[in-house]
Amino acid sequence: MSKTGESPNGSIQLLEDPKLAAKRIKSAVTDTGSEVRFDAEAKPGISNLLTIYSTLTGKSVAELETEYEGKMYGHLKVDLAEIMVDFITPLRNRTNELMADPAELDRLLAQGAERAREIAAVTLARSMSAWASCRPSASQASASSMSAASNVSEGMSVGVILGFPPAIAEELQRWRASFGDPMAGWCPHTSRW
């Protein structure tokens, strides 16, 4: 299961037939010996299966080692195959339902996009607030704006002109050089874009 590039049997596709996933788990190449214990160097195959099992169940690898003490690899594989099927089946079924109903899929995508916009708006408001707190006072701004044109033409950073701390001014200058002028559209009177 760890050498995914060599064979399709080395990976589990989350949307594949659960029976095929179970078959792949049961036929996974393990290591010599029969002791179920985690050792990434000496037992990479069984260690991989223990990691998958632990991830899907929330049990620690140590708990699994204790649970399978005295048992063979086959016991672990059969149990893990069942757990994998229980994990994949609802995911696959829901995906198939959504793919069969494009209107519902579009509705859910739009709902997710709206939620993302709401979260992004809060983040943007916080960053704009933090950014605005770096701006100079009105008297400093008017003094700065008087010499802004000559300073920009002399190569001075927009961030320095606006009174940003040096580290922020340097980052703003690097960003401006890479992506264009981030100050385009900024309204100094309303502190809004």
Image (tube, grey):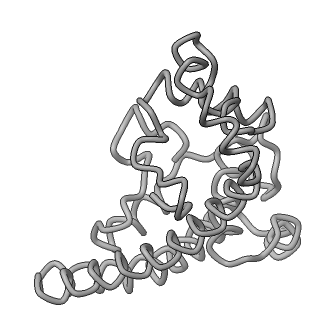
Residue drawn at x 80%, y 55% as measured from the top left:
35
Closer to the camera, 100 or 62? 100
* Left/right of residue 92 with respect to residue 154 in the rendered view: left
* Left/right of residue 16 with respect to residue 28 in the rendered view: left
Q: Position of residue 162 (x, y in %)?
A: 67, 39
Identity of the residue furthest to the top in this view: 154
- Dividing the image into 4 quarters, which one contains the C terminus? bottom left
| Rendered view: 146 above or below 24 | above
Q: Quadrant of residue 88?
A: bottom left
| Rendered view: 59 above or below 180 | below
Q: Position of residue 186 (x, y in %)?
A: 47, 50
Residue drawn at x 38%, y 66% as measured from the top left:
14
Q: Position of residue 97 (x, y in %)?
A: 20, 87
Q: Position of residue 58 (x, y in %)?
A: 73, 77
Q: Quadrant of residue 146?
A: top right
Closer to the camera, 125 or 12? 125
Closer to the camera, 106 or 192? 192
| Rendered view: 22 above or below 37 | below
Residue drawn at x 58%, y 28% as measured from the top left:
148
